[in-house]
Amino acid sequence: MRALLCRELGDIANLEVGGIPSPEMAADEVRIGVKASGINFPDILMVEGKYQVKPALPFVPGLEAAGEVLEVGRDVGDHVKVGDRVLAFARHGGSHAEEVVVPGGIATPIPDAMDDVTAAAFPVAYGTAHFALAYRGNLKAGETLLVLGAAGGVGLAAIEVGKLLGARVIAAASSADKLEQARLHGADELVNYREGSLRDQVRALTDDKGVDVVFDPVGGDAFAQSVRCIGWEGRILVIGFASGDIPKVATNMILVKNFSVVGVVFGEHSSRYPDDSRIRLGTLLEAWGTGTLKPKVMQTYPLEEARAALDEITSRRVMGKLVLTL
């Protein structure tokens, strides 16, 4: 099969498209013929050897896929069968290829009305957002949510899921164009990082009370500022570090405001509880069917142009998602 290959850790420029054998499949797994594959920041971290999951070389990056079930292991339940259209989260990579093998429990049927490209953009962003906000952050209707990095794929998903859960959403991003995307996806208030202090702008929007929940895929200074504008007994959800800077927090600040810093690793949760994640994604797909959730795919690329797509992620120019088509 054709696949995007990482033969040595380092720069994404070393990636190449080549032919490799189809992956072996265990009794509790399914084989998917990939039609489209979502691109994510962790793809880059995996190639650089900086991601928490470190596959043996050579490996195929890629965390999410949409396509057709080609084979079903004997220990997989009856929720999926050969010929079904499904989307899936590939915790250990492998989706940037013509075939991927994933735990059978995570293979989630795609609605007939959803195309493969949209489906490939769905599981990581929306799964992470819902897992973070509903499960780890316990976001309640009427609370105020601050979304950092609000124009990225997971940021836009967090805005929509926050609104779905009944929150008031403040979106923060670094440009007017990015904030316009956040507004189109339902944000109630907009904050530009580059037009003054994030802390001061958020506190002004909350009558100096601060926010109840912070959704942070950025890290760095944005995290430091969020510590200053989190409210009493708030929750800061640590999603990732797109800024490249892993921040620290003084524990006296946690004590004084009685707030929580909560880790969010949807991928590991999905590996441990695949059925739970499939049910979560199914619920979100039902919301998509009503028009409540609107995944934004900025651009698609053929597999041979995967490095160009990953360069766009690195440059932080992407609004929404990028998807490879096979």
Image (spheres, rainbow, N blue to C red):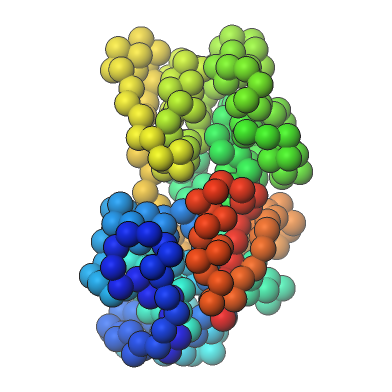
Q: Is residue 71 visible?
A: yes
List x then y, in percent, for residue 154: 55, 48
Q: Residue at x 50, y 66 (%)?
A: 307
- The answer to whether residue 147 is above or below residue 100 is above
List x then y, in percent, for residue 251: 28, 17
Quadrant, the N terminus: bottom left
Q: Residue at x 55, y 48 (%)?
A: 315
Q: Residue at x 74, y 56 (%)?
A: 291
Farthest left residue in view: 56
- Quadrant position of residue 181: top right
- The answer to whether residue 308 is above or below residue 244 is below
- Quadrant position of residue 262: top left
Return the residue nearer the eye: 18 or 94: 18
Q: How many marks?
A: 0
Return the residue nearer the eye: 213 or 76: 213
Return the residue nearer the eye: 204 or 85: 204
Return the residue nearer the eye: 131 or 36: 36
Residue 24 is left or right of residue 290, and the answer is left
List x then y, in percent, for residue 235: 43, 28
List x then y, in percent, for residue 148: 55, 34
Q: Is residue 273 visible?
A: no
Quadrant, the C terminus: bottom right
Q: Residue at x 61, y 51 (%)?
A: 318
